[in-house]
Image: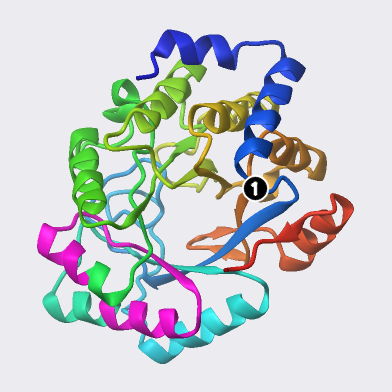
Amino acid sequence: MITFEEAAEIFNRPFFKLLRTAHEVHAQNFDEQSVQVSDILSLKTGGCSEDCAYCAQSARNGAKAPKQPMSDRETVLRAARRAKERGATRFCMSMSGRRPSSEKEFEAVCGMVRAVKELGMETCVTLGFLTEEQTRRLKEAGLDYYNHNVDTSPEFYGKVISTRTIDDRIRTIGIIQKAGINVCSGGIVGMGETNEDRIKMLVLLANLIPGPPKCVPLNKLVKIPGTRADDSSPVDDFDFVRLVALARILMPKSYVKIAAGRNTLSESTQALCIFAGANAFFSGEKLLTADNMPNEADDGLFKKLNIKKEKLA
């Protein structure tokens, strides 16, 4: 078990010593010149009953994303094919809401997972809370990853969300792990939390039983006018790089993904993140309701760094 004190000591090491340690850990466990690329599609947008302070899809927030009904299978497959052409090996499908709203909706998602798997891609979905029966069916459909973020530290969680608890999230992660599905779980930084909260979030993930998430997305808050987190102070870029390095050291065999907010990071900062152990990114110009990096910008950066996109075995 990793303690907060141990993790805080690592986080606060001299910057270059921290990065050197993280890079050595990364090189021992991954190809240091390779990154995994995913693409994401919103299957259903807006109208969510949760009150997450950062999210435009919440019906309780001042900023309400336009409601979009459930996508059909052909729309999903067209998006997945485009993602594969761009070099993505994993296709993620996200649906707003606390949980799937009907059996028909859930079965449609299972069918989409099967169809995307037939394209030769890894699959990931975000559907909120699940039952053991639902996770079993997703596993049978061929699901590789399930995204269920813990968002922030246990201590700060109640200041961000009141319609669920962090224990609710951890229970669902346990159900997913029990089904044999890889967990993708991380959080969002820049919502008003402290570095201590950020460290505690990573300690929580590193200490999950039977093991940490296979993929740990770190999201830099994208401020959306009307949301309750819209007036929070931005995260210092050096603190963000430190967080990437800490994630790599605490979870050496996990993919560390730079997700939302990457378009606010300079090429130099992204390069530092990669050196510190970040080895997964989202492609495509949109991450649900937020802007992302254009694919040509990623290709240009990867070329400068001699980085190649990971291919499936």
Percent of width and height locating residue 220: 56, 40
For residue 303, side relative to residue 79 (left or right): right
**Residue farthest along the bottom direction in this orientation:** 74
Percent of width and height locating residue 124: 40, 64
Q: Residue at x 28, y 62 (%)?
A: 127
For residue 86, side relative to residue 198 (left or right): right
**Is any part of residue 193 visible from this angle?**
no
Q: Secondary structure at mark 1?
A: helix
Indicate yes or no whether the magenta region holds residue 177. Answer: no
Indicate yes or no whether the magenta region holds residue 119. Answer: yes
Percent of width and height locating residue 274: 71, 41
Q: Residue at x 63, y 47 (%)?
A: 279
| 57 or 154, nearer to the observer | 154
Q: Residue at x 48, y 16 (%)?
A: 7
For residue 33, side relative to residue 168 (left or right): right
- Range of the magenta residues? 110-137
Which amino acid lies under the numbered mark 1 shown in the image of this protein? Answer: Arg
- Quarter location, residue 164: top left
Screen quadrant of the C terminus: bottom right
**Is any part of residue 148 visible from this angle?**
yes
Q: Residue at x 48, y 33 (%)?
A: 251
Screen quadrant of the N terminus: top left
Question: Badge 1: how crowded within 10 Å, few (<14), some, or many (20+)?
Answer: many
Give the tally of numbered discs: 1
| 51 or 170, nearer to the observer | 170
Check the image and report above or below for 85 versus 128: below
Check the image and report above or below for 289 versus 159: below
Which residue is under mark 1? Answer: 262
Percent of width and height locating residue 139: 26, 67
